[in-house]
Image (spheres, rainbow, N blue to C red):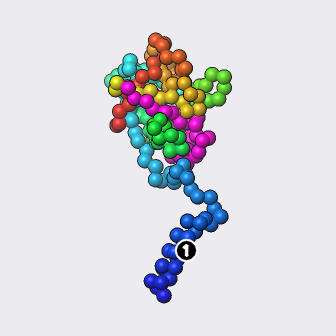
Amino acid sequence: MGGAGYCLRYLTVLLLCAFGSGAAAPTMCEKPASWVSVFKYRLWDVAQKSLYLRNNQLVAGYLQGPNSALEEKISWIPNRCFERGRLPIILGIQDGHRSLACGAGALPTLQLEEVNITELSRGGEETARFTFFRSYKDGLWRFESAAHPGWLLCTSAQSNEPLGLTASPDDAHIVDFYFQRC
């Protein structure tokens, strides 16, 4: 019954998948973390300020010479729980072990959280505060918060200031970035 037994087990698995076994069917959001590709990129603003970590904050500043080694690379993964056409991604630093998140409040703030981006990839709509929609125009990228529509990732026009969010791009808030694979 070697071949017939295998066929019977295979048919049982197919029927359980087709008609259900009482368990909820997995969704695209439940993709195991080991299957998720993590991409590593450089992110710097149009004023040529790079990102680095200072006092547990992601800061944008001019890094030259030996200080260029301080630059934080951005790890990202797609967030398949949101409309693909909006290019939703989850951003992190330190090889994706710390995630960028939009804090709640009257005015959203950007913060770093000790959560791996691959763990977040298995979440659903609750990952909105970790998700940014990418948009591309004329060689530049913008990153809009999924949790706070209209709020964009920004750097200050001043050097060595924390990365933040703004709803009003102006001369003081730079929202256009270069985003290049490492």
Is residue 35 shown to the viewer in this render? yes
Q: Is the residue 10 above or below the residue 72 in the image?
A: below
Residue 154 lies in magenta, yes or no?
Answer: no
Label 1: element kind: helix
* Residue found at the far bottom of this picture: 1
Residue 45, given in percent of the width and then of the height, sits at 40, 22
Is 120 situated left or right of 44 in this image?
right
Residue 141 in percent (x, y) is at 41, 27
Tell me which segment is drawn in magenta.
113-137
In x, y percent, where is residue 170? 48, 13
- Residue at the top extreme of this rendering: 171
Tell me which amino acid carries mark 1: Thr
> Where does the C terminus fall, quadrant-wise?
top left
Q: Is residue 89 visible?
A: no
Instruction: Say which residue appears at 59% left-offset and 66% top-offset.
Output: 19
Query: Which of the two residues, 84 or 146, is positioned nearer the viewer here?
Result: 84
The residue nearer to you, when weighing 5 against 115, is 5
Q: Quadrant of residue 26?
A: bottom right
User: Compared to 138, does 36 lie above or below?
Assistant: below
Residue 163: image x %, image y %?
A: 50, 24
**Mark 1 = which residue?**
12
Compared across the picture, whether 104 is left or right of 34 comes to right
Task: Kindly identify the residue that appears in the image at 60 percent across and 41 percent down.
Answer: 125
**Res 24 → quadrant:** bottom right
